[in-house]
Image (cartoon, coloured by chain):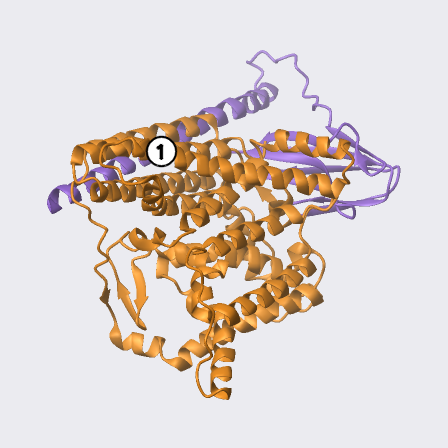
Amino acid sequence: MKVSTKRMVLGAALIIAILALFLVLQPDDSNDDDTTTSSAPAVTTGEAGTSPGEPAKPIKPTPPPVPTVTVKDGEPEGGVLELDLKEGDLIRFQVKSDVDEEIHVHGYDLSKDISAGGTVTFAFPADIGGIFEVELENSAVPIVSLQVNP
Amino acid sequence: MIPFAHALASRGDLPIPAWLFAWGAAIVLVVSFFALSAAWRQPKFEETRWRAITPRLSRILFSWPVASVCGAIGALLLGFVVYVGFAGTDAPDRNFALTFVFVTVWLGFPVLSVLIGDFFRVFSPWRFLGRVVGGGVALLFRGPVPHLEYPERLGRWPAAAGLVAFVWLEIIYGSIGTSVSLSPEVVAQATVIYSIYTFSMMALFGVEKWNERGEFLAVYFNMFSQLSIFEVRDRSFGRRAPFSGAANWAKVPGSLGLVISAIAVTTFDGAQEGALRPAIEWLQETLGDLGFGVTEAVRGGDTIFLLIVIAFVAAIYLTGVKGMLGIPGAPSFAKLRESFAHTLVPIALAYLVAHYFSLFVFQEQAQFTFLLSDPLGDGSNLFGTAGTGIDYSVIGTSFVWYVQLIALLAGHVLGLVLAHDRAVFIWKDYRMATRSQYWMLAVMISFTCLGLYLLSVANQ
């Protein structure tokens, strides 16, 4: 009786261990796929510029428009701006405000002052995963939500 | 809006992705069927089999000078929380009191209780001060003063009520208008009010009695210490067979209420960040349209949903009990309900770890750096760590997912183990015991998958 229960506990532990191992392996695969697909175009465009053998792609490297949130009467127009990014990306966004405020990016702990009628641009690498809020520090009103995925 | 967590740690957990959710659910099913197919036929954990270890260490640890020092530390910390709450900064994240009460104590002590046993008994400021005053009064009257008889039917119900009230204060009362967190001053006020209430009850019913039944922190941490292999008996430190402590815990009335509340408050906190958020916001807007002020509408909507979640969690468990009632040889519903209550303690622990692990890791960095050196948030630097902040990159987002998943799975397995053991104790016929366990299996799968689901839609 005692031996069989021990064996059972061991069996259960083994199953968990095996499945846990599977789990650990699983995201590595998907991660690798993701990183190769996302980094591939960057590499090819870089080579296209240097090696003349490759047919140059007609796409110009124009950066996408910077996401902008406009603060009107102390509130973000159209609600909180949601940005969904991957770790390693460059986080860029612009804030326009009609009030004097301090803009605080939580987690990354970056702050910039903005004066009424002014525009402030943030650009920093997304090196911490998770969900972060960007707030108007004095009124504690959230204006941007950053989601940085692995 | 995520009121409490955001006032402190500034990094929110990413929702568990679909593939991990699927894996988690699959493992739960595999483990569960394994548990059904190969299990023991004689109860193993009903007898505690406690034996003393390190008697010499026990003699020092439980001598009155050491106990007094421990109690005094607790009392000083209680006083400090009140002082810092009143005198310190209004910013919740820069004030020692909030992080200490709601993260270090509330989230850290349950885990520590599982690891080393019911240590809070020795450090409880209320028990210590109550004993000191009680001793003084006894000296004055030359003999112990008689107390009222504690109504045993009340059991642990006062603690269950205290737990719900505490969490209500933490995550519901804090939302005032657009402000997102409890102010340190309110924490200090609440601590003072709770202390007065606790001392009054101790004066009425006796210090030890109230500490075991009504003082919700002591009762809550003691609940988790039932999972520990360490237990103190007669001032002697000892070891017991794993899981055997929990077997007798739920015999006191109200224990089921306590563990259900513990699961429900974490469920509510998780659900309000994702699954229930649209529904809660709808109710709050409706209440606002009915003419309630913003604060009343927000608190009212949250409170109604907290009660709904408590009822929902209770319903999951009671449905399982109702099902077991149909198995030939089952005892009464009340007896059955009490008999399996302790199997939910691992679930409560799993929920706590899964939901708050990252918050704890981030906020404890603050606790031991800037909050330690600058508890009032007034610019002092006692230990030279005031300039150090929280490093949000210490744990990766996928690491958090695995901790959450493993916590839920471990709670699931532990709950099943305890339930199976109790079943073979109640039903001498092994076939009937197994049949009863289909129901508990359904209960545990429901709780584990609910936990996984909440994590998969959190913060979205």
SS label for mark 1: helix
User: In the displayed structure, would residue B280 be above or below residue A4?
Assistant: above
**Closest to the observer: B124 or A132?**
B124
Question: Which chain is assigned purple?
Answer: A
User: In the displayed structure, would residue B121 be above or below residue B449?
Assistant: below
Question: Which chain is assigned orange?
Answer: B
**Closest to the observer: B339 or A102?**
B339
Q: Looking at the rendering, in which quadrant would you find the C terminus of chain B?
A: top right
User: What x and y, as percent, mark residue B371?
Assistant: 61, 62
Q: Looking at the rendering, in which quadrant would you find the N terminus of chain B?
A: top right
Assess disc 1: are there few (<14), some (14-19) or many (≥20) residues with their C-alpha within 10 Å of its C-alpha. Answer: some
User: Which image quadrant is residue B409 in?
Assistant: top left
User: What x and y, as percent, mark residue B53?
Assistant: 24, 69
**Closest to the observer: B440 or B20?**
B440
User: What x and y, as percent, mark residue B239?
Assistant: 26, 62
Which residue is depicted at the point 57% across and 62% down? B369
Which chain does the residue under circle 1 lie in? B
